[in-house]
Image (tube, rainbow, N blue to C red):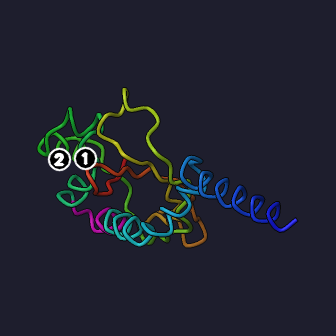
Amino acid sequence: MRQTGRIIIIICAALLIAGFVFWDTPRNNMALLLEKDTIEKTALAYLNAEMKKDSRQIYALLAPSSHYKKTHSYEAYLKDIAENPPPAINRCNIIRIYRLRDNDNKQTYPDVDKFVQVEVEVVFANSGPNNIFNYSFTFLKEQGKWYKG
């Protein structure tokens, strides 16, 4: 009886460890706990740059592997926003950071290590204080650093 109890405990422990090592969800949930502050700082830096219309900071926080950044220089980006200016933001608030996941599509996104969603409430300058808009932005981790996707 005692031997059987030990074997069951060892098997359960082994399965639990294997689950954390091989199953993405628990592993990514743990990674999210460890990286949440860094992701939040990056997201806030991006959102603050958007509110201040700091084009240099916005462009710097775009993922280097993104199609837009690969095909547009900073000067081209400035031309784009001059021709089609984004709406002014009065305030924004991060609601949650969720769904951290590994890049399972390395052929399409070879430079991306991880993806995460950042849910944000935004109030635009000309929309009135009660008009709160909800967006989910994708952020990417490339070479150890987080960027706006």
Residue at label 2? 78
**CA gap, disc 2 to disc 1?**
5 Å
State the residue position of label 1: 81
Q: Residue at x 32, y 57 (%)?
A: 146
Q: Residue furthest top?
A: 107
Where 108 falls versus 65 (above or below)? above
Farthest right residue in view: 1
**Position in image of residue 64 (x %, y %):** 23, 44
Span colored in magenta: 47-54
Q: Identify the secondary structure beneath mark 1.
A: helix
At 17% from the left edge and 58% from the top edge, which residue is drawn? 56
Q: Tell whether label 1 touches label 2 (CB within 8 Å).
A: yes
Residue type at mark 2 is: Leu
Q: Quadrant of residue 71?
A: top left
Please determine whether, in this image, residue 64 is positioned above or below residue 21. above
- Measured as percent of width and height from the top left, residue 44 is found at 37, 69
SS of the residue at dot 2? helix
